[in-house]
Amino acid sequence: MQYELVVIGGGPAGLAAALEARKEGIAKIVILERDKELGGILQQCIHNGFGLHQFKEELTGPEYAGRFIEMVQKEGIEYKLGAMVVSVNGEKEIAYVNAEDGLVTLQAKAIVLAMGCRERPRGALSIPGPRPAGIFTAGTAQRFVNMEGKMIGKRVVILGSGDIGLIMARRMTLEGAKVEVVAELMPYSGGLTRNIVQCLEDFNIPLKLSHTVTEIHGTDRVTGVTIAKVDANRKSIHGTQVTYECDTLLLSVGLVPENELSEQAGVEMSRVTAGPIVNESMATSIEGIFACGNVVHVHDLVDFVTKESQRAGAAAARYIQKRLTVSGESIHTEPKHGVRYVIPNTIDLSNVGESIELFMRVTDIFRDVKLVAMQDGKVIREVTKKHLAPGEMEKLVIPIKNILSTGGEITVMVKEA
Amino acid sequence: MKAQELICIVCPIGCHMSVEKKGEDYTVTGNGCPRGIAYTKKELTAPSRTLTTTVKISHSNFRRLPVKTSSEVPKERLFDVMEEINTLTVEAPIKMGDIILKDVLGLGVDIVSSKNMPRV
C-alpha cells in the first residue's frame, strides 16, 4: 500500500507531525500506534501541568493528548491501533503487524519517526543482589496504577528524583502506600522544584540527595532496600548504609530514546543523545526520513515536543511536495564547554526563515553564566542565565542575519558572565 | 516574626521566595510575578491543591478513568476526597469534561473526567 506520509508512533510527537503535514496539504497520511489508543505516554500522566506554553492553560496528560486526538479525528487522518512496526528500511518501506490486518508492508514517500523514549531499567544500574518481584521503573508503575488499576505495593522506596519519580511518590501516597524515602545519586534533584514541594514536602516524604541503592533484600518479593551516601565520585561511603523495610522499589533513573527502528533503517545516530542526527528541518541522514520528539532527544515539557514535531511534519510535507532543499550546504553545530549536546546537529540555511532555534542541555549546574553561540570566533548570540541545570533544556534563538552562510561550524558553550 | 522561606508552585519556574509577616500584612521578596504574592498568602493561610486521581470504570479499554478536581481543594482534605472518589465506579462511555461527582464532600468542587473513554 502507498502512502505519502507514514508516522511511526501516535504519541504527542506523531500526532503533532501528522496534523502539521495535513495542514501543509498532505492527503494520504497514516499514523501507526502500537497501544490500544492514541496519545502515548500522556495517557498515563494523569497529573496536571501540561500545556502551559501550547494552550496557555494547565491540562492533565490525557486532556493534552485528547485535544490532539480530537484534531486528528476531525481531520480524518487515518491511524492504526495495536499496530507494531517490525521493520523500516532506507527505501521507506514499513512493515507493521496487528491483529486485524496481519503483516502489512507500506511504501511511503516520507516517514516521521516518533517512537518516543524508554526508561532505563534496573539492568542499566548494576545494583547487586537478588532479583525479587517488586522492582519497577516509575513509568511502568504509573501505567499499572493509573490505567490498569493495579496497586503495585504498600511500602515504597524510590531511586531517582526525576519528575516521574516525584510524581509517583505523590501518586502512591494518595493511593494509600507509604513512601519511605526518595534517594538521588546526584547532589541535586533532576525534577522541577515545584514537584519537590507538591509531591514530596506536601506529604513529608524525605529526599536524600547524594544517596544511592547499594542492596536490594528479598528473594520472592522485595523485603527491604539499603541506601548509602555517596562521595564526590558517586562511590558509596562505607558506614552510611540505612536499610528501609519495604515491598517495592521504583526506579526513576533516566530515559533513553527508542531507536531500534531508526538504526534498522540505517539512520545516522548521535552517541550523545542516543537519537538520530537531525538538521534544521528535523530530517535525518536518510532523505525523506524525519524524526521528532523524545526519539531525538528527551524533552522536559510536552509543549516543546509538540513544537518540534510540527516542524518535522511541515518539513516532511514540503519534502513530499519537493519544496524542501535536501542537498544544500550545511553548517554543523558543536557543543563545547559546559554543553552536552545541541539540536539540530546541522543547519541548511536555505530552509530557515528569520531565525533558527538551537536546543541544548548543559553538563552541570551553573549559576550566573552566559550561554554563548559562536561562529568563526565571533559571538552570534549570547544570553545571560541565572541558573542552568542538566535537567532543564535550554534554547538559543539565533537571527539568521548573524550566521555567515559560508562560515564554519557554530559552537555553543557556557561562559563566565 | 522571622522570615519564612517558600517555593512558589504556581508555574514550573519555582521561585524561591522569602515571606515576613508584619501584623496582618505579608512582605514577600524573591517572587518573579504577582502570582507569587497571591500564592504566599494562600499557602500560609489556607493551602490548597488540585487533585488528580482515577475512578474505576467498566466497559472500557482500561480499568481506570483519570479525573481531576474542578478547582483546588484544601490540602488537609486531600485524603478525605481520595477516600470518597475511591468509592465510585462509572461505566463507559465517558467524555472528557463529564462531571463524575458533584460537590464532593460539600467542598464546592466537582470531580471531572479528564479523558474520553469510549465503550467497548
Image (tube, grey):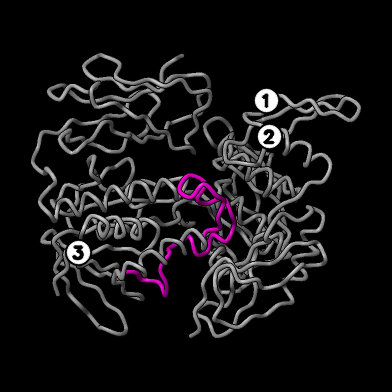
Q: Nearer the viewer, residue A134 or A203?
A: A203
Instruction: Bin the neighbour count of mark 3 within 10 Å (Cα to Cα): few under 14, some 14-19, many 20 and up.
Output: many
Q: Please determine whether, in this image, residue B50 is positioned above or below residue A388.
A: below
Q: Residue at x 65, y 73 (%)?
A: B55
| Magenta residue check for A33 | yes
Disc 1 + disc 3, Cβ < 8 Å = no
The picture places residue B14, in percent across and down from the top left corner, at: 62, 36
Instruction: Bin the neighbour count of mark 1 within 10 Å (Cα to Cα): few under 14, some 14-19, many 20 and up.
Output: some
Q: Chain of mark 2?
A: B
Three-letter code for the amino acid on which mark 1 is drawn = Gly
Is A135 on the left-hand or right-hand side of A300? right
State how far apart marks 1 and 3 are (Cα): 52 Å
Three-letter code for the amino acid on which mark 3 is drawn = Val
Disc 3 + disc 2, Cβ < 8 Å = no
Which residue is tagged 1?
B30
Q: Residue at x 42, y 31 (%)?
A: A362
- Which mark lies nearer to you, 1 or 3? 1
The picture places residue A109, in percent across and down from the top left corner, at: 13, 61
Labels 2 and 1: the sequence-earlier one: 1
Q: Can residue A133 be spotted in the picture?
A: no
Which residue is tagged 3?
A88
Q: Nearer the viewer, residue B69 or A134?
A: B69
Q: Chain of mark 3?
A: A
Q: Can residue B38 be spotted in the picture?
A: yes
Q: Secondary structure at mark 2?
A: helix
Query: From which residue to which does the magenta span run?
Result: A32-61
